[in-house]
Image: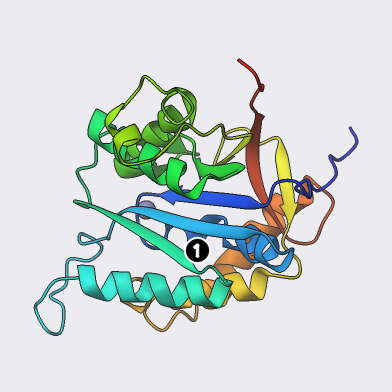
Amino acid sequence: MTSPRPHTLDASLARILCIAAHPDDIEFTIAGSVARWVREGRDVVFCLVTSGGAGTNEHTPENTGLVPIRERESWDAARILGVKDLVFLGYQDGVLEPTLGLRRDLTRVIRRSRPDVVVCGDPTVRWYGSEYLNHPDHRAAASAALDAVFPSAETRAIFPELLTEGLEPHKVKEVFLSGAVPPDTWVDVGDTLAIKCAALKAHVSQVGTGDWVDTLLRDWAVRDGKRAGVQYGEAYRRLVLRSGT
Ligand SMILES: [Zn+2]
């Protein structure tokens, strides 16, 4: 079997929106691709559905809760990756559902940022191997994100209240699903894996000193790079949405 080649985004795909449930999801999964896309001159926007208020069972130092800490860490990580725009939707961490309200909020973000590509998780994955259950927030955010991409973002009659906000329909061209089983597309992150590690380490409330981060992310990148014949990779399922339907 021949290896698939690593995937390079077409030059016409200049605007990218990454949607995730929690503040560190992007840095754990797709941040190498993000840093690469930024280096290629593309505009990347992050949308975080929750602010990660349930991310630890410890008391926070000021007892004001985790939300302000995690939002600050998310901005730090985004800056390291070269991402200038970060949207928090403010949903409660840990109990996320793919409601119509969430779909409307994500549709609003899509119509505002008008991305060519949306990157999100795979809502169909309940578990990985025999050790990891996928977090229900990840599934909920990904499910609502896909429903926002199609049909909500591109259909005038869905959420007409968005029209009154001046948000016209928008057609997304491609969707990249992170954590999909099985993947079919790989991005070479050999030049940006170090930036990904630095960005994840910005989430100090989650990773502590972060001395394990480089090893973990390198191991994952080696595993995913193998299929595409590169040293370090990130894996996706890629959807190219038909135009004119
Ligand atoms: Zn998460």
Q: Residue 224: x and y, percent?
A: 69, 50
Dot 1 amino acid type: Glu
Q: Quadrant of residue 86?
A: bottom left
Coloration mode: rainbow
Q: Residue 7: x and y, percent?
A: 78, 46
Q: Identify the element where label 1 is drawn.
A: helix
Is residue 225 positioned above or below 205 on the image? above
Is residue 128 positioned above or below 33 on the image? above
Q: Nearer the viewer, residue 10 or 94?
A: 10
For the C terminus, the quadrant is top right
Q: Is residue 187 left or right of residue 177?
A: right
Q: Residue 206: x and y, percent?
A: 34, 71
Q: Is any part of residue 125 visible from this angle?
A: no
Q: Nearer the viewer, residue 35 or 166?
A: 166
Is residue 155 positioned above or below 169 on the image? above
Q: Nearer the viewer, residue 127 or 9?
A: 9
Q: Nearer the viewer, residue 91 or 214?
A: 91
Q: How many marks?
A: 1
Q: Is any part of residue 46 visible from this angle?
A: yes
For the N terminus, the quadrant is top right
Q: Which residue is mark 1?
A: 27
Q: Quadrant of residue 57?
A: bottom left
Q: Quadrant of residue 221?
A: bottom right
Q: Residues within 10 Å of mark 1 (few under 14, many from 20)?
A: many
- The structure residue drawn at horizontal position 31% and vertical position 43%, both measured from the top left corner, is 137
- The structure residue drawn at horizontal position 44% and vertical position 35%, both measured from the top left corner, is 168
Q: Furthest-top residue in view?
A: 245
Q: Residue 98: x and y, percent?
A: 29, 32
Q: Furthest-right residue in view?
A: 2
Q: Furthest-left residue in view?
A: 63
Is residue 76 positioned above or below 228 on the image? below
